[in-house]
Image (cartoon, rainbow, N blue to C red):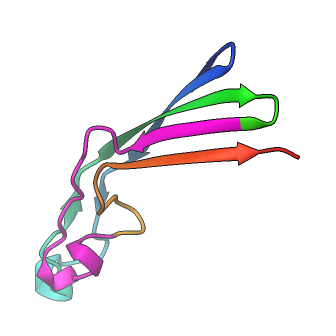
């Protein structure tokens, strides 16, 4: 969702990852996974873009605004950082800044 007011655009992004269950029958007895169920997760991101001139835009933002920690999956399902880094946010809150120029 974004709001524009003159040269300033403010945007908020909600990233929702639904709950999931290991689909291997038998749970920990068969596949060795220690975590069979992962809860739903909500991440919120905030960004501001300012048109400084007709040819330059500055953008500042925060990803994972509330510093939501990733769900741990246990050593038996060991992935990188003991979670699924391609799905969940293992880095926590991070900031970014950019300047775009048009020629």
Residue at image position (34%, 58%) is 89
Which image quadrant: the N terminus? top right
Give 103 or 63, whichever is nearer the viewer.
103
Image vertical order of residue 11 relative to residue 103, above or below: above
Instruction: Report the side of 93 relative to 9 (left or right).
Output: left
Task: Tell me residue 10's x, y (percent).
Answer: 55, 24
Q: Residue at the top extreme?
A: 5
Residue 71 magenta-drawn? yes
Q: Is residue 38 above or below residue 46?
A: below
Q: Is residue 76 left or right of residue 81?
A: left
Q: Which residues are magenta?
A: 57-84
Instruction: Tally the numbered discs.
Output: 0
Toward the right, the furthest residue is: 103
Pick the front one: 15 or 48:
48
Q: Quadrant of residue 33?
A: bottom left
Q: Position of residue 14 (x, y in %)?
A: 44, 36
Answer with left or right where residue 98 lies relative to residue 27.
right
Q: Quadrant of residue 23?
A: bottom left
Query: Where is residue 78, by image quadrant?
Result: bottom left
The residue at the point 29 percent across, 79 percent down is: 80
Percent x, y of residue 79:
28, 80
Q: Is residue 37 above or below residue 28?
A: above
Residue at image location 81% in from the left, 36% down from the top: 55
x, y (%) of residue 60?
Answer: 50, 38
Residue at left offset 69%, top offset 28%: 52
- Judging depth in this view, the residue of 9 and 103 nearest the camera is 103
Residue 19 lies within the magenta run: no
């Amino acid at each position: 969702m974004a709001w524009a007011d003159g040269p300033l655009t403010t945007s908020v992004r909600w990233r929702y990852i639904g709950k999931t269950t290991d689909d291997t029958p038998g749970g920990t007895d068969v596949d060795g996974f220690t975590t069979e169920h992962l809860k739903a997760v909500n991440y919120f991101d905030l960004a501001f873009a300012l048109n400084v001139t007709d040819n330059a835009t500055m953008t500042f933002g925060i990803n994972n605004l509330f510093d939501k920690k990733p769900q741990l999956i246990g050593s038996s399902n060991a992935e990188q950082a003991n979670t699924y880094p391609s799905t969940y946010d293992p880095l926590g809150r991070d900031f970014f800044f950019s300047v775009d120029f048009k020629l």
